[in-house]
Image (cartoon, helix red, strand yellow):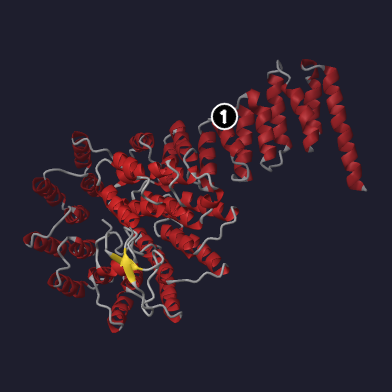
Amino acid sequence: MEISALGLGVQHVLLCRNSAPFILSVTPWSTRANTSHVCCATTLDKEPLGQPPNFNTRRVTRPHSKQYLARQSAILEVQQSSDLESVLTRLGEILKVQDLNAIIRHFGMRNRWHDLSQLFEWMQRNGKISASSYSSYIKFMGKSLNPVKALEIYNSIQDESTRKNVHICNSVLGSLVRSGKFDGSFKLFQQMKQDGLAPDAVTYSTLLAGCIKFKHGYSKALELVQELRHNELQMDTVIYGTLLAICASNNKWKEAESYFKEMKDEGHLPNAFHYSSLLNAYSITGNYKKADNLVHDMKSAGLVPNKVILTTLLKAYVRGGLFEQSRELLTELEALGYAEDEMPYCLLMDALAKAGRIQDAKLVFDEMKEKSIRSDGYSYSIMISAFCRGGLVDDAKQLAKDFEGTYGKYDLVMLNTMICAYCRAGEMDSVMEMLRKMDELKITPDNNTFHILIKYFCKEKLYMLAYKTMEDMHNKGYTPDEELCSSLMFHLGKIRAFSEAYSIYNMLRYSKRTMCKALHEKILHILVAGRLLKDAYVVVKDNPGLISKLAIMKFATAFMKLGNINLINDVLKAIDGSGCKIDQGIFQMAISRYISDPDKDLLLQLLQWMPGQGYIVDSSTRNIILKNSHLFGRQQIAEMLSKQHMISKASKSAKDK
């Protein structure tokens, strides 16, 4: 079982970028510094709200006005009310837009999503709203992982200047990124630029945060950084931190190292997050020497390694095979109180198991149980997999029973782990037992479950069972892995399950994934072998240029011999449209089919089409047509062949000149 990478991700980066504290009232700076109470008795004369006072200038304080105190009291009452509609109806006239915005932030920071939405809708209805209101509300909708609502609000903005506010757009981008809607965030980014908005550093930082978990995130991040620099925007510590995290998640430690150096050369001081991200990049490849040096540099800079740093260093050790040093570091983590959960033990246990040292891994597992370390069951799954890999299936089953007895039930992660372990061990009965248990517990299989089963059934040459499982997977809304589909298509073709192979091709074809070019040709060969020529025609017609000319001509030959006669002309047009030149042998086979079934005017249509595409029949085919011209109308045949003959002579004359 792969232990997921440590380190902070999208949420951390977005929070770093938006780390300015929210002000929950309109209290002046002087009172914020001295008291948390919103109804302070004094204020600085004419000091602008939200601006720090000039302490070098002596000012005379005076009591707050009655209106100000009434607003402060109203803010508190709205924040504490359980009947928002009633209190807003009563106090709404007193409150200004900036007061309501402060209440929005108050509700948002306390995750009071229902109150937040109710307040915002009231503000819209009563015209007490500003660009700041939209920005705050959309940002908090993103925090609640409700990007649909955030987009709805953004799209509902009527005022053009408000809609094209870069801060509001950044809030929508943050909402989309937090919820994993990376494609949607880039569409909005492009729309911003089309609307004439100039993205700022926050815009790029927000999009870069989305690149951490995006499949092709590194290449997209490079594009964004290049554009950011082209727009003469400055890289800051948050952007550098995000780039380091992206490099780590894409296994690019050299690039991470380069950005780290560049950041320091520009005068930015790295913090714990920067060190953690670079360390994570080293740990993924087990580069323990660089990891050790980095932690030493961190200490020299006056930073104390925290739990994340030391646990990531442990990961570098175990992946580098330094098991003794790993043991010592684990002891240090225990002494510091950083080993209260199972993660550091699992790192060492998993590495030992994969190195074949199953008994050493079991010792770590037993030690963890003796110390009553808090566990979510991952340690059990690691040992069950290790036992199965080592052929100790009975030990794996016993441990599974212990898990059930300790935790009272199975969850999906554990069931998937056990199914995978039993599949590796070839324990078909145990696999089926786990599937029955999944049904009994009413646990729905996920994408991982299906992939484990399909791979296992293919390995056992149970190809039809693998197909049925993939079909069930598709019906549940999951898209199978392309490589797995390709392999299963090939095996189904071998056992002459041609329709099933085509069904798998269509699962991928109608999904949103981009298909590998080779799959189109592979399914074409399978369909031709199975004489599913009408389906093969669809593949050729829909994918011109993606299939080799050799494969297309092989299909053409098969279709002329055995395909539906009514589709022959359409097939010839599709072949010509794909860029393949049709030879005389193909035309002769088509014409022979028409002569054997002369009831339709398909031959006349073909002869009429050919000259326009630069084709004419050769003398041998011409003689066959003339010999059977009485079947189609001698005069029409003669006229068409005469026209082809004239075109041929003209073409030959032009070549001679």
Q: Amino acid at mark 1?
A: Lys
Q: Where's residue 294, x and y in %?
A: 32, 78
When asked about the image quadrant of residue 576, the answer is: top right
Question: Going 44% across and 71% down the picture, which residue do you hit?
Answer: 236
The total number of labels drawn is 1
Q: Where's residue 404, x and y in %?
A: 12, 45
- Furthest residue in direction left, as rendered: 370
Question: Going 77% across and 23% down the picture, which residue do you hit?
Answer: 604
Q: Nearer the viewer, residue 364 or 125?
A: 125
SS for dot 1: helix
Question: Going 20% across and 75% down the picture, which residue do you hit?
Answer: 325
From the viewer's perspective, is residue 473 above or below residue 36?
above
Answer left or right for 339 relative to 463. left
Residue 633 shows in this picture: yes
When asked about the image quadrant of residue 51, the answer is: bottom left
Q: Please tell me how crowded label 1 is: few (under 14), some (14-19), or many (20+) other residues with Cα within 10 Å.
A: some
When asked about the image quadrant of residue 118, the answer is: top left
Q: Nearer the viewer, residue 151 or 351?
A: 151
From the viewer's perspective, is residue 620 above or below residue 403?
above
Q: Nearer the viewer, residue 482 or 233?
A: 233
According to the picture, the residue beneath numbered tag 1 turns out to be: 534
Answer left or right for 53 relative to 419. right
